[in-house]
Each structure stands twice: as structure tokens, then as C-alpha cells.
Amino acid sequence: MASSIERIDTSLARVRTDRRTLAILAVLVAIGVVLLEAGERSSDAHHPIWRAILLSLGGLIVASATLSLVWQLAGQRRFAQEVLAAAGVAADVRRAGLRAISDEYLDIVDWPELFHHSAEIDLLASWGITWRRRYERQWIEWIQRPNVHLRVLLPDVDNDELVRHLAHRFNKEAEYVRERVTETATFYRGLATNSGSNTSVTVRHVVRAPVWAYYRMGFTSIVTLYPASLASTPGVPAMVFDDRGETGKFFRSQFDSCWDDGK
């Protein structure tokens, strides 16, 4: 009921605005016509300058009033609708905490900079070897800092059904999946041997097939989607979120839930 009343009030306000605008423009047009008429009646021989001024001024007023009418009744409101729509999208983006979208997850953010400023890192992936190898030097430098904490969540390769599912998804052999996941787990566990003081490294395995890879570094979350099929797949979407935004909180809560189920 309240929304209906608001729509009625909005419509009435729009009608009143249209009437005021039309009244003002009608007065301006009338003034312009009077000036044009006065200019036409002036003699070129006796008042050449005044005739030109009156005709120019009258024509300018009539043209301006006509353009203003078109803008007020059509263009301005359409423009306002576009601005409001854009503002609505911007508000949604801010609420979600979205910072960037790309199909190049390896370059979507300044990864070395994130390593430099992060004291906590959470990872969820099927194995993520390409990304890990690319930033191996940053990992070795990061783990030597004091008071940093790493949590890594990987698929449980002891579960044959899960391994077969991942092998089918990525068009690989089951043994390949086991080797890649085991290699990834070994690398991250091995970081603990060179860790700084009060630093922790924990790797868990979960009986779930990740549908997205998750990298949380400080207050920044990077999420990449896994395709259902590798055939004719375009660039995989990657998104960057502020971990304190609504979407960032969603992915973090999902990670925490899977983490609690891990072993």
C-alpha cells in the first residue's frame, strides 16, 4: 500500500513539474514571438541595428525554449533514469565489495604486493600448480616472516569417487589428479621447515570437489570459477573482492565451512 501511495505522489509531482515547465516555456515563447514581430515591423532604413537585435534575440528565445521543452519532457528524464540505473549498479558493486573482473586470474591483481601486505592466507583449489609455481619465490619469502598464518584446503585423494570426478572434469587420468594434489600438499607443508617465528602452516583435505578456487590474502579475496567442461572453454572468469564486502564474506564463510569439514 505504501509503495502505491509513493508511486501516486511521484506521478503527481511529475505532472506539477510538467505544468510549471510548460507555463514558463509558453511565456518565453510568447516573448520570443513578440520580439520577432517587433523586429519584422522595424524598418531597415531607420533602425537596422535594432531590427537585427530584435530578430536575433527573438529567434534565440524561441529556439532555446523549444529545446528546453524537449529536454525537460524527454531527454532529462531518460538521462536521470540512466544515472539512477548506473548508481544502482555502483551501489550493488560496493555492497558486494567487487574490485575487479578478468579472464586472466594470474594477472588480475598484483600478487607480489598482496604477499607483501598479507599476514593471513587461505587457499582452496583442486591443486593450483600453475599459480603456485609462478609465485614460488614469493611463497618462500613470505613464509620466513614472523606471525604469518597459512591455511590450505585440497581435495581428499584417498576418496576414489572424488578423484574420479576430478579426473573426468579436467580430462585427466586419476593417477595424474592424485599426483598433482599430493605435490601441492607436499609443497605447502614443506614451507613450514623455513617458517618464521610464530608462523603456522596447516593443510587439510576435504571430500568435496571445488567448483571455484579461492585465494584470500589479508582483506583481498580472489575467486576463479572452474568450468564444467574444458571443451571450447573461453577464459575462466576471475573476480577480486574486498573480504569485508557481502560477497567476500560469503566466500570466506564457505571456505570456513569446508575447512571445518576437512581433515
Image (spheres, rainbow, N blue to C red):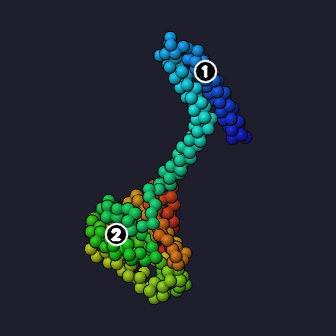
Q: Which residue carries the number 1 mark?
A: 33
Residue 238 can be seen in this image: yes
Amino acid type, mark 1: Val
- Position of the N terminus, as image quadrant, is top right
Whether residue 143 appears in this view of the structure is no
Badge 2 is on which residue?
200
- Secondary structure of the residue carrying numbered label 2: strand
The label number, if any, that marks residue 46 in the structure image: none
The structure residue drawn at horizontal position 63% and vertical position 24%, both measured from the top left corner, is: 26
Total marks drawn?
2
For mark 1, give the secondary structure.
helix
Residue located at (66% from left, 35% from top): 10
Q: Is residue 201 above or below residue 2?
A: below
Instruction: Please name whichever residue, 9 or 193, is drawn nearer the observer in this view of the structure.
Output: 9
Residue at image x 27%, y 68%?
141
> Percent position (x, y) of residue 91?
52, 48
> Which sits earlier in the primary sequence, circle 1 or circle 2?
1
Q: Is residue 109 left or right of residue 160?
A: left
Front-most of residues 125 and 196: 125
Place residue 161 in its image quadrant. Answer: bottom right
Where does residue 192 sit, x and y in percent of width and height? 31, 74
Work out how far the residue at label 1 is from the one at label 2, CA to CA, in angstroms.
84 Å
Instruction: Name the one closer to the observer, 21 or 85.
Output: 21
What amino acid is at disc 2?
Ser
Badge 1 crowding class, 10 Å Cα cut-off, few under 14, some 14 to 19, many 20 or more, is: some
Horizontal relation, residue 5 to residue 192: left or right: right
Whether residue 137 sits left or right of residue 169 in the image: it is left
Q: Residue furthest front?
A: 45
